[in-house]
Image (cartoon, rainbow, N blue to C red):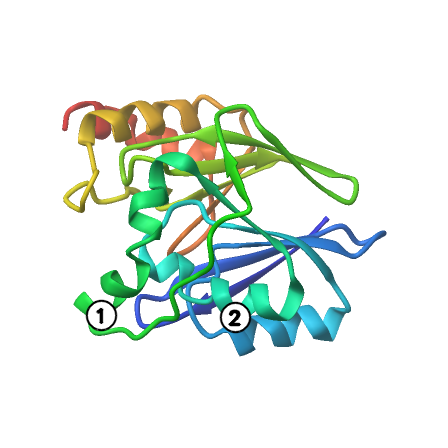
Amino acid sequence: MKIEQIVTGPLQSNCYIVYDEASLDAMVVDPGDEPEKIMKVIDGKGLKVNYIVCTHAHFDHIGAVAGIRERTGAKIVLHRDDLEIYNSGKDQGAFWGCDIVQPPEPDLLVSEGDRLSVGGLRFEVLHTPGHSPGGICLYGEGMVLTGDTVFAGAIGRTDLYGGSIEELKKSFKRIISLPPGTGILPGHGDRTTVDEEKELAPFIQGL
């Protein structure tokens, strides 16, 4: 397994390209902006993108979905509980002063426990609401892609539409309950691990 991390857009969102070295099958997770920058990596490595996965539907994580879909034909993956937010993507961007192309309808509305295969790689969908109603994490291959649920030393904000601090606390607890050594690839900022973020637990439970 290989992972390419690409920082995009004014909010410096992390886009991840996860691929199987043997088959060159890939998924693109949270393409938030700058589709040409993302496609340069995909084309340069000769990857076949199977899925475009949105860990949640805020504009800074879906802004390049349309561009990547147009170039790759990959299936767009989203949790059904974020569909309302997803469908307002262009309006969200405009509110924050960003012009994005409204992404097409998702091809696959996932739920808790669903699995995605990328070549020989396997990932499980964890429904982790709190930052948004349909937030998901992808867990597999010794790592978890957390979107804006868990960051290095922080958790996502809950003051946006559909946010809930109580739900996010539950989701955080779930992530830090994953096996020791599990890598965390967040939607913004640096990578971390389950072990490191367990130190946050008392603080989070006190919120």
Residue 183 location, x and y as percent? 54, 40
Q: Which mark is residue 190?
A: none
Q: Tell me the amino acid under the disc marked 2.
A: Gly
Q: Which mark is residue 94?
A: 1
**Disc 1 packing (10 Å; few <14; some 14–19; many ≥20):** few
Q: Is residue 110 above or below residue 90?
A: above
Residue occupying image coordinates x 24% and y 61%: 92
Residue 116 location, x and y as percent? 64, 37
Q: Is residue 30 above or below residue 95?
A: above
Callout 1: helix, strand or loop? Answer: helix
Q: Quadrant of residue 8?
A: bottom left
Callout 2: helix, strand or loop? Answer: helix
Q: Is residue 136 left or right of residue 172?
A: right
Residue occupying image coordinates x 27% and y 73%: 98
Residue toward you, 178 or 46: 46
Q: Tell me the amino acid under the disc marked 1.
A: Ala
Residue toward you, 128 or 81: 81
Does label 2 or label 1 sit earlier along the sequence?
Answer: 2
Q: Residue furthest right?
A: 22
Spatial CA distance of label 2 from label 1 is 18 Å
On the question of residue 149 being in view, the answer is: no
Residue 70 location, x and y as percent? 58, 69
Q: Which mark is residue 67?
A: 2
